[in-house]
Image (tube, grey):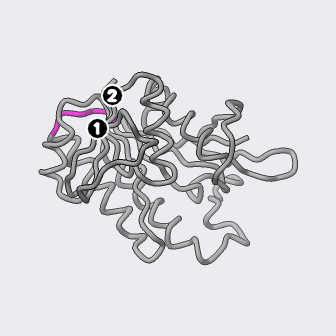
Amino acid sequence: MKIALIGATGSIGSQIAQQAVQRKHQVTAITRRTAALPAELAGTQAVTVDSFDATALAAAIKGHDVLASAFGPGAESADLVIKQASVLIAAARAAGIKRVVVVGGAGSLFVAPGLQLVDAPGFPDMYKPYAIAHRKALDVLREAQDIDWTFFAPAAEIGPGDKKGVFRVGVDTLISDAAGNSKISYADYADAFVTELESAAHSKQVITAAY
């Protein structure tokens, strides 16, 4: 499979790229600045292009099977998540790519009927702009009826850790363990993400992975 990946040098994106290459997929890292990729991304091709320029992005991804995005700006630039979603859709259409899979935000997952995590009591204020931006980006994806999209939200807590290879994947709802914790490592999330790229099992759905 030929995968075009935005955000391939980030904490999540680099894991996605590594695991996709290990599974013998061809990965093109879409980068905004010309620079050598780190050693851990050996086997990944880099293409320098402004990911907010739909025309340039379409030219860079043409011929790929799927457009994936692990784009993650700082909290002070959270609204760029919404802009990126719109550009992804426009570029995919122009390039003739039907499959778009994005790293979403856990805030869009439901924790009770009609209640998303971002709206639940106790959700940290510092993360709200980012979570709300992801929810608006999800609205952009949902409007793209001609695109086979998937919004893949991680667990509420994601960070460094070993790859266990054992986790649960669900639809729409936050996954927590018996103690009420919702966690996953970058490595296991990436494992689940690449599996979704391969299977296309959750078309036009919000999914998540957690222990």
- Residue 26 circle label: 2
Mark 2–mark 1 CB contact (< 8 Å): yes
User: Residue drawn 48% across and 39% down?
Assistant: 205
User: Residue drawn 22% across and 45% down?
Assistant: 47
Magenta-tinted stretch? 95-99
- Residue 71 circle label: none
User: Residue drawn 73% across and 72% down?
Assistant: 122
User: Residue drawn 59% across and 59% down?
Assistant: 107
Viewer-proximal residue among 125 and 31: 31
- The residue singled out by tag 1 in the image is 45
The answer to whether residue 194 is left or right of residue 165 is left
Please tell me which of labels 2 and 1 falls first in the chain: 2
Residue 96 within the magenta-colored segment of the rendering: yes
Q: Does dot 1 land on a helix, a strand or a loop?
A: strand
Q: Is residue 145 visible?
A: no
The answer to whether residue 119 is left or right of residue 23 is right
Image location of residue 78, percent across then percent down: 43, 70
